[in-house]
Amino acid sequence: MVDRFFEMTLTVPSGTVAVGGYSPVPEELSAVHARDTDGRALIPGTALRGALRGALEAAVRADGERRACRGGDGIDPRDQPRGGSDEEPEKPRKCTLDRGHACLPCRLFGSHDSLTALAADGAPAPRPFGALVLSDALEVEDDALEVEGPEPRPWTVTHGVGIDRGKRSAVEGLLFSRLTPAPGRGLAFVAEGRLTEYSDEFKGALEAAAHLTRHIGGGTSRGLGRIDITLSWKAAPPVDGLPPVEGDRRVVVTLKRPACIGVPVNQENVRRTRVDIPGSTLRGAVGWAIAERLKAAGVARGADDAFEALVAEREGDGGGAIFDFLYPCDGMPPDGITGPWPITRRRCKRDDEHPHTDVLFDRLALRLAEPDDVGRVVDTLAKRARCAACDGPLEPVTTYRGQRRELRTRLVTRVQMDGRRRSARDGMLFSNEVIEAGTRYVGAIREIPAGGGGRLAEGLAAPLSLGRGRSRSWGQIAVEVEDMKPPSPLSARREAFMTALRSHRDAFDARFTVPAERLLTLTLTSPLMLTGDEADVKCVEKAVGGEVRLSVRRFGVEGGWDLRNKHATPWTRSVRAGAVYVIEIGDDWSAVAEKVADIERGGVGQGRCRGFGRVFAFDPALSHPERQAVSRSSRKEDPRGPQNRALVQAAEEVMAKAFGDRDMRGRLSKSQMSQLIGVCQEAACHDEVANYLRYQAGRRDGSWTTAMASAVIDGIEALFEQQSVPDDADAARMKRWRLYATYLARAFTWHAKVSDNRRSR
């Protein structure tokens, strides 16, 4: 296997970098350099790809023998009208500049969706993906920093102002503040990447682009963004000689990079992510990875029997492996079943630690009660529609089984640049919602065909990416394969259901028209795909052979992308996971038990090889919802919560006191708050900030009074003592100072607004 993997190191020889449009900007700042959720600086992969592409395009055009478009627009800028011409610039088109084919930069970096040509039927043609996969460049510790521990490099606020050259004075409203990594020796970033289609031409082009790229981001005229890039090639991770994956296996997937899993219907320029990962997504990624290996080995498409057996469509007996849906799960539930809770499940709005309840049996009581007993059932339900612990209101449970922490997502907004005009392309501002790296998912791969286990092991060990943004290394995952614990026996679950239903019937003091022995419950643990005008109830009845007496469900749509045939799959109606069906079956349970076990294993409806239509009979979450609840106390709470809350409260107290005492506040303004934030970003210890405040209080301009400076210092020193932060823990103290200064600025803005409103009255 060729060495198609590489590591790209970016060093900043002087100054710092400023790449905006990635991280949210606080109100008191004008711009913020890109950073991750832990506050560590990074360079977005899109910005890095843009800088590399610009350098390569210039080099190709300078050669004189070859042509290159600008930014994937399909137009050689040398053919564009020069400045002052009345001729309209050409519209972007598919690139054919290299002897009728895409130019070298387009083949290496790809092109944007909107620049792809249309097929004959007017539908979008398959997009020409680039060969380069490149991740965000993350800040790394450098020996020159001489920093102990995992603390990131400090940040600094730089201030600037727009100048009116005619008036030789500042322009009104153009005072700006930019937050960037502190300049100095040792500022470095590392990105990882690979070439999906290796060739000497691509390798040489990437090395040349890395050598020629000298700037990135904004502020180049002010000395920002100066970089040196070093490229080092690495061997591919070994995937040969792995033991085959056989039988039914549990799959644990951890996101190594942020992921955006495509939804069937998107807004125009906002791409949301779905929270679960369809089995088709993992199936496609594994199949793509195996196909790449086979192609590199010279194996013709369709010639490898083991691979074809593994990915064969399976709607009946035989066929390929079943890839179940993957769901967020950071702690396995008691019954080992992952997925959404039944949609009949309820929790207390006031306190999540109160026992959960389920309303399925209440609905069954209304549906099955004898006509003479319906009034008594309604009266009883009116008393049961509140939390049993506090009599508070109830709400549906929207989390997943085994999910203890809230799923972390964020919105990433980027813009495509027009290289000719050096400005953003019109209509090319777009946002992607991504799931944060580190999120853990659990699913299963079942019914692995004989001979396909070896190919599956190779695919799972290869570099895998899920969802959108593959070229930016989004969706990279680490996969672990574990033994799968079988669920509790079907007979035991049925007995628990009948006992719970009889208990509810007795509580209502009502008679049911159907005995508990003749009822079967099925809970969807993945969406149920429907075809044509098929009704979901008929689909379930056909699979089981009974009559649906109660269905509690919600509808949606499913869609996706066929990687093998390179086209979008049509939208399909679906029933969302978590739906519950109650079916009346015959008196002979033994005649039905085998069929129920079969549909638990194989599912119902369409798309079963992709994980759709999974069902779970006699779900314990319905019979004993209180045992399945995950209390808040068992969740992994963010340790920063109490610390930050105390800092907010301290800042609010200081500002409330200041705005209650005019002499104490003096002539303090928002600019002083911004300056304090900047000092905290640059300072290395608490004494440095305290020294700055005392200096300001000693000046004669009255911006900081002695009382105000002392109140700010005393407020945080009290927290240091309360939280037992040692005097020599400079990093921990400065972390708190930076937050404290931000909270002070926000509290100042609020109190100043309230004060202005009072004066205006």
Image: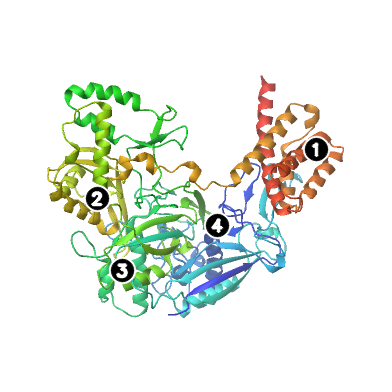
Q: Residues within 10 Å of mark 3 (few under 14, many from 20)?
A: some
Q: Earlier in the sequence, mark 4 or mark 1?
A: 4
Q: CA distance from mark 3 to mark 4?
A: 57 Å
Type of amino acid at the residue the image marks with label 2: Leu
First of labels 3, 2 by sequence position: 3
Q: Position of residue 291 (x, y in %)?
A: 34, 72
Nearer to me, 281 or 503: 503
Q: CA distance from mark 1 to mark 2?
A: 69 Å
Q: Which amino acid lies under the numbered mark 3 shown in the image of this protein? A: Glu
* Mark 2 crowd level (few <14, some 14–19, many ≥20, 10 Å Cα): some
CA gap, disc 1 and disc 3: 69 Å
The kind of residue on which mark 1 rests is Ser
Which secondary structure, mark 4?
loop
> Which circle marks residue 421 in the picture?
4
Q: Is residue 749 above or below residue 607?
A: above
Name the N-terminal-most of marks 1 and 2: 2
Q: Kindly tell me whether residue 302 is visible in this rendering.
A: no
* Above or below for 477 versus 232: above
> In the structure shown, which secondary structural element does the residue marked by tag 3 occupy?
loop
Element type at marker 1? Answer: helix
Nearest to viewer (mark 3 / mark 2): 2
Mark 3 and mark 2: Cα distance apart in space: 24 Å
Q: In this figure, which residue is indicated by the disc labeled 1?
A: 710
**Residue 451 visible in the picture:** yes
Front position among marks 1 and 3 = 3
CB atoms at circles 1 and 2 under 8 Å apart? no
Residue mark closest to the camera, 3 vs 4: 3
- Residue 537 point in image, percent of width and height: 19, 42
Residue under label 2: 490
Return the disc, 4 or 2, that comes first in the chain's sequence.
4
Residue highlighted by disc 3: 246
Q: CA distance from mark 4 to mark 2?
A: 67 Å
